[in-house]
Amino acid sequence: MSKNYDPLLKELGVNVELHNKLIESMSKSHEKTHLSQKNRPESIEYFDNAFHGSHGERVEELYNYRKGGGKSIGTFCIYVPDEIAYAAEVEPFALCGGSGWSVNYADTMFPRDICPLVRSTFGMALSGTCPYKKLKDFALGETTCDAKKKTWDLLGIKTLEVPQRKNPIDRDLWKHEVYAFKDMVESLSQVKVTPERLSETIKLVNRKRKILQRINDLRKLPNPPISGVDALLVSQISLNHNINKFIEAGEKLIKELEERHKKGISAYTKSGPRIMIAGTPSPMGYAKVHHVVESCGMQVVVDESCTGQRYYSNPVDETKTDLEGMMTAIADRYFKIDCPCFSPNKERIDNIVATVKEYSVQGVVQSILMYCHGFNVEAKVIENALDAIKIPSLKIVTDYSDEDLEQIGVRMESFRDMLLQ
């Protein structure tokens, strides 16, 4: 960040001294995982800057939006229907923390044996280093895991109820929750969600999804023009960034990637086994497993997680013209998300098997954040499904720290050698 944002951060109640330490930690991590790569696309620099700007330029942007009368909400999950928020002129942005630096600051309120995503996120809040704390009218949680549910209870955070099954009665419950969200944002902004506005925002969010899909389609190529680490960065930025700016930058990146493909330029200097990373999300600031995989000479060609395919798959049906039809289409689209909170979760198994074939994947790394029981238990089902189609897999259970990097590296090298046999 070239501009000094300290005065703004102080106005927002941020502990600037500690915040500078957080930024230093995040910058060092980004330099190791991203900037150390060779042969990166030139357009990826925009996303590097957006990563650093998430605690500067983006903060100022939201501050000015709210100062002008705009409303904004913080979210923790991809189940929140952005289309509806935008239609009510409410700006949504992701709050999930991906830095190991802030984890220990959460210990004054939370147990140590819950997932690092919760601890990192609220560690920033409790340490006074989260610049978004005063830039939201409310935060919105969801019922995708017990740790999150109890966190929302503890902190009095509004919640969307995500059903645990996919029967007709569950679909009806979810549709009710989607309508409840519409009421929330309309009440907040005093702007009605009209068919005209909702039609526009459905197309806008679909356009973002299509950009992410196109970037990831290019990873199907024998010589992908973008690395897995950088593709993850683009997806992470999409969750927090201004949507119009992201679309513009994403389209520019696509043009460069297509040109690199025509010229035979790959992000990788050497060929290596093609890897899918499946499992828990990798919030902005966390690219540890992706980095280790690619540092060991393998290529991450697809992400199955909430910061991967699960986020951008399945556009909302744009053919509906009435409000009821559009709201139902939105509810149905989000109901297709194959989170492990659902039981049974055959959709996720089928999607992983289909994606393995579509991306010519040779091995799957299941990256699971510590204490994420839903993904960890379901990992055995995934392993069995992959065994049935003769695709080797490796489960890595870890957190945001670097303490186990060497151990993970040794296991990853062994996995690579097995794939090369």
Image (spheres, helix red, strand yellow):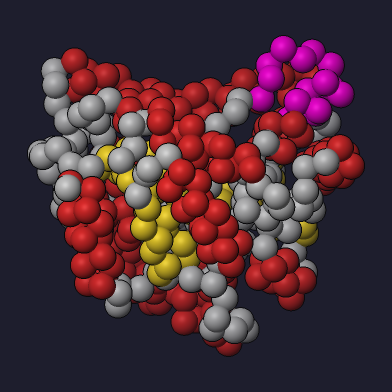
Please indicate whether residue 84 sits to the left or right of residue 174 in the image.
Answer: left
Is residue 319 rendered magenta in the image? yes
Q: Quadrant of residue 175?
A: top right
Instruction: Specify the farthest residue to the bottom.
Output: 108
Q: Residue 8: x and y, percent?
A: 48, 60
Q: Which residues are magenta?
A: 316-330
| Residue at the (46%, 43%) spot, across then down | 388
| Residue at the (14%, 21%) spot, across then down | 264
Q: Is residue 377 visible?
A: yes
Q: Residue 54: x and y, percent?
A: 43, 52
Please count the marks in the image. 0
Return the residue nearer the eye: 75 or 386.
386
Is residue 369 rendered magenta in the image? no
Rendered position, 316 above or below 402: above
**On-image quarter of the N terminus:** bottom left
Please indicate whether residue 41 sits to the left or right of residue 395 in the image.
Answer: left
Q: Quadrant of residue 21?
A: bottom left
| Residue at the (80%, 34%) spot, across then down | 191
